[in-house]
Amino acid sequence: MKQHYNFAYFDEGSKREIRRALLKGICIPGYQVPFASREMPIARGWGTGGLQITLSLIGRNDVLKVIDQGDDESVNAVNIKRLVTGVTNVKTTDATEEANLIQSRHRIPEKPLREDQIMILQVPLPEPLRWVEPSEAVTKRLHAEKDYTGAYLILFEEIMRYGRVSTGADHPVMVEDRYVMAPSPIPRFDNPKLHSSRALILLGAGREKKIYAVPPYTKVVSLAFEDHPFETEVDDSKVCELCGAVGVFMDELVDPAGGPTKYRCNDTSHCLDRRNREAV
Amino acid sequence: MSAVNTLEQTKAAAIAAEDAPILRVEGLSRMYGSGCKYCLPAGGRGPRVSAGGGTSDASKAAAAQSAHAAADTGSAAHPGIAAGSGATGNATSSAARESGGPPPFSSAGGQESHESLRGGTGVNGMAADNNTSESQTPPSVLEKNWCPHCGTVHAASDVSFSVYPGEVLGIVGESGSGKSTVMNCLYFDDEPTSGAAYLTNWDEGLTDIFSVSGQAKRRIRNEMMGKVYQNPLMGLKMRFSAMANIAEKLIAAGDRNVGRMETRAFELLEHVNIPSFRMKDAPVNFSGGMQQRVQIAKALSNNPPLLLLDEVTTGLDVSVQAKVLDLIKAIQRELGVSMLLVSHDLGIIRMLADRTLVMLNGRVIERGLTDQILEDPQEPYTQELVQSLL
């Protein structure tokens, strides 16, 4: 194959700069490290943060998995995989256990991750306090002074309005008792997977030019009140119509014709794996 | 330093033991600009040197750089003595105490030397049963509070006062006189250029609250003070419910129990007459008077010992003004909160304040019991102000 680009698209200097930001992020769990987000061949807001991390880390022997909304085969996931293989020729996979780099939007795989894997999450809004404070200068100071009133205030307001915490995704977490972090729009169901994760978790926001990280075995606690403890949204009465799994994050398929609502595993790779095992 | 001074200190300490000020502000200044300390009239930069006994502000400024040195030289009219003798004449009047007896917390020389810097107070302090007019005439170099040579604005200059438990201290003055600047500095919305403030509730009044870390400042602000801004936009999160607005201060002070905070917010909002069916609405949908009442409830949420009220009724119509004022009066009576009340409206000051400071061009020009200020104003500006009341 004729190479039009340097290996992994970036020049080596760019890779270094991003890796340096990553190292700083790992050293200060949950702290948002600014970095020089590059122009990418995909638009900002479509996963450029995650993509830049992936490209700065990937080597010839790595195996890549890309998920979008739990799905390995959605357009965004496929396009990102194509782009990365186009500039690196690395192997890609759908199986969580085969991959050592997993770039994802909206989900952490159902299958437990291992120490030799790196989870890369794409982040649209890295600042958990942005809804209460529009100024970056002020939020930086709030983080520095560990004033997370705003993050709790958002949850309190939801309880006032809806009677319960209604964050569908991106429920803020406290990392290592210091920084409050936006875990990217993963469902609340995935929040507990961040806690003491075996895999290194890296988060990149391309548009907002921020990188942050949760190193392996780090304490991650979802924000909650004493009388409104943190709860995940999974309800064990729902069963996947394809593989029969329970207690996993489901997609809800509403029949417009009025038929019964069906549920399927949101993590397609996990669902497929279960069915393949059954077939054997 | 004479023996008399020590005696006065002991007296002041005795008074302090009964009734220590809850807030003590010393020489608070806020400058905007390159920070001239009154340029030379010839256009040259640098402090004007004066050998006199500290009557001119320039010399005060110079002395402020080396407070200890000034104290050691023993300036001519030692205000510590003069004002102290005033206190003897009228020991029960907090106004007299205000006028400059050595503050109760300090025994250190630094504090005393600061008092010695307060130019003319000594002379006027003699007439302690009258209000003290402060001959703090700004240097002629300045145009109002602006230095024409370097363009520096002296928004507040050397403002000192104390607030005692349960009292309402009024600050009155025309717009631009530095009232709000003082208030903003005290609530850490602005940073003073120089000066110090001590709160009894913070480190027993031993530490200057301007010198502590940002985190500590947040604690002081969230747990020991409440502020009501003139503009509700500043004090409230307009798109969060009234309940959440009150909870914000409770959360900031470390409460993590929704039920408890909700009860407290309900109680407070009821206290300020917000109907219960509107408590979960956002203040953006409230009338100005209601917003102001939510602000008051928010400021009170942590039972702060000190409440800062900045032009709370400006912009409200008269009947709503009356309601807000009634509420403040009731809170003061029921909860015994100390208040610092800034207003340009002498009517409000007359109604609420026990003691009053008059500010002009960033300086305190007169201080005393509110009635005295209104009945017997000493400074020409105050006289003008009182005249215009009628």
Image (tube, coloured by chain):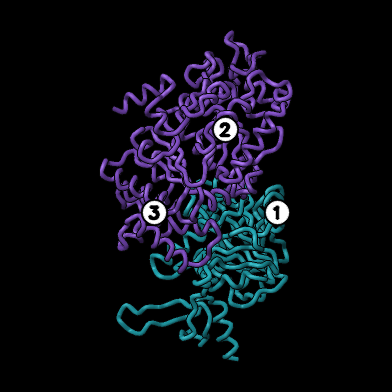
Chain colours: A cyan, B purple
Q: Residue at x 52, y 55 (%)?
A: A129
Q: Residue B71, position in %: x, y?
A: 70, 25
Q: Which residue is mark 3?
A: B239
- Distance in Å between CA atoms under marks 3 and 1: 36 Å
Q: Secondary structure at mark 3?
A: loop
Q: Chain of mark 1?
A: A
In primary-sequence order, the first of circles 2 and 3 is 2
The kind of residue tagged 2 is Thr
Q: Which residue is mark 2?
A: B88
Q: Residue B175, position in %: x, y?
A: 40, 29
Q: Which quadrant is home to the N terminus of chain A?
A: bottom right
Camera-nearest residue between A97 and A150: A150
Q: Which mark is residue A24?
A: 1
Camera-nearest residue between A72 and B288: B288
Closer mark to the observer between disc 1 and disc 2 = 2
Q: Quadrant of residue A107?
A: bottom right
- Distance in Å between CA atoms under marks 1 and 2: 64 Å
Closer mark to the observer between disc 3 and disc 1 = 3
The kind of residue tagged 3 is Arg
Q: Secondary structure at mark 1?
A: helix
Q: Are marks 3 and 1 in contact (CB under 8 Å)?
A: no
Camera-nearest residue between B351 and B271: B351
Q: Are marks 2 and 3 in contact (CB under 8 Å)?
A: no
Q: Residues within 10 Å of mark 3 (few under 14, many from 20)?
A: some
Q: Residue A45, position in %: x, y?
A: 51, 55
Camera-nearest residue between B121 and B5: B5
The kind of residue tagged 1 is Lys
Would residue B248 appear left or right of B76 to someone viewing this image?
left
Q: Chain of mark 3?
A: B
The total number of labels drawn is 3
